[in-house]
Amino acid sequence: MTLLEVRGLTVTYPGGVAAVRGVDLSLEAGRKLGVAGESGCGKSTLALSLLRLLPAGTRVGGEILLDGEDVLTMRWGRVRAVRWAGASIVFQGAMHSLNPVHRVGDQIAEPVLLHGRATAAAARRRTGELLEQVGLPAARARAYPHELSGGQRQRVMIAMALACAPRLVIADEPTTALDVMIQAQILRLIGQLVSEQDLALIMISHDLAVLADTCDRLAVMYAGRVVEEGAAREVYEGALHPYAQALSAAFPRIGDPASRFAPRGLAGDPPDPASLPAGCAFHPRCPVALDVCAVEDQPLRAAGPGRRAACVHVGAAVPPPAGPERDVRSTT
Ligand code: ADP
Ligand code: MG
């Protein structure tokens, strides 16, 4: 059953910043979708739009159907009910999301109480259960955020996200602020909890290897669009779009410090969404761009079962880009 269906989503921040430019995605109940792409490609904007968390003055177009109901046209009361209870978000940098003056247990219990699911005593019990699920002793409920390590705080954030048993969890670079060993643990924990509880997950990361490990499907975003989408392993091991190829070459292994670096073989940065290049937004960095790419953007095209890519070479033979990224791939 389809839990989330995003159709033709566009998000433009004040000042004409076209951060998301026509995204279509769907997610079945209980499945896991990874969203990858360099910083600035619109991943967080997509995540925030799903729960109407974008700043005032932002223009949003298209449809976001959660269980068939359009989030974009819901009344505010309904949006509030959906947050936490229907879908919840784990943000990066938990340190800044927790209130420093309240005990973490009270912060976990808050959404449980707010959504009228429990009495105070039941909420306390649930808080203890949730802490144990995320691998912390129930007694840590009495701790203040500063008494916990970064990894423990991120576990608390995950407990909060699970508190009201949402059907969808959105994890936006949930481990970016943590060291690499803890990162792998936390990502595995999220994947495991989501599987055990049969929740759907959208996991956002710049690290394709981590996503390929955790998710069923992968969408690669560039300059506000999905440029490739398919089964996670297929996209990671045999990317079709040159951008997805560069991303998968950049991140050889989960937990490898090299995963901090930019995609190998790709010079420059993603374009500023306020001044996008003509044609395919990736063409200035593309190792296999043709003349046509500077004038014509490519739509996502079918590229095998359950697989889509937006490249002029897809559908035709895809010439492998020459360069070091091939060597990296062949050694992993
Ligand atoms: P990602 O999560 O992939 O790094 P974001 O969704 O955060 O990307 O950002 C996409 C683009 O939108 C970036 O160019 C960013 O500078 C811009 N952006 C993000 N938030 C705002 C905002 N509140 N106002 C204007 N531009 C924004
Ligand atoms: Mg982001």
Image: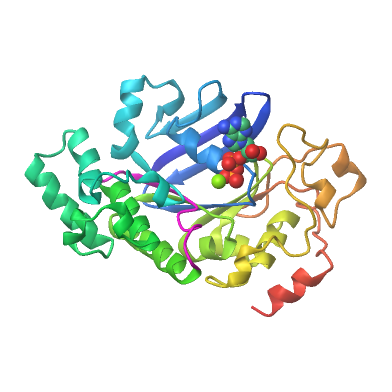
The residue lying toward the viewer, choosing from 79 and 112, is 112
- Residue 180 in view, yes or no: yes
Q: Is residue 292 left or right of residue 160?
A: right
The span picked out in magenta is 165-179
Q: Assess whether residue 272 is covered by the magenta stretch.
A: no
Quadrant containing the C terminus in the rendered view: bottom right
Q: Position of residue 81 (x, y in %)?
A: 29, 30
Q: Is residue 9 left or right of residue 105?
A: right
The residue lying toward the viewer, choosing from 253 and 269, is 269
Q: Assess whether residue 174 is covered by the magenta stretch.
A: yes
Q: Quadrant of residue 79?
A: top left
316, above or below 328, in the image = above
Q: Is residue 103 left or right of residue 309?
A: left
225, above or below 60, in the image = below
Q: Position of residue 16 (x, y in %)?
A: 68, 25
- Residue 90 in view, yes or no: no
Point 82% across, 47% down: residue: 283
Overall secondary structure of the magenta stretch?
loop
245, above or below 28, in the image = below
The tally of labels here is 0
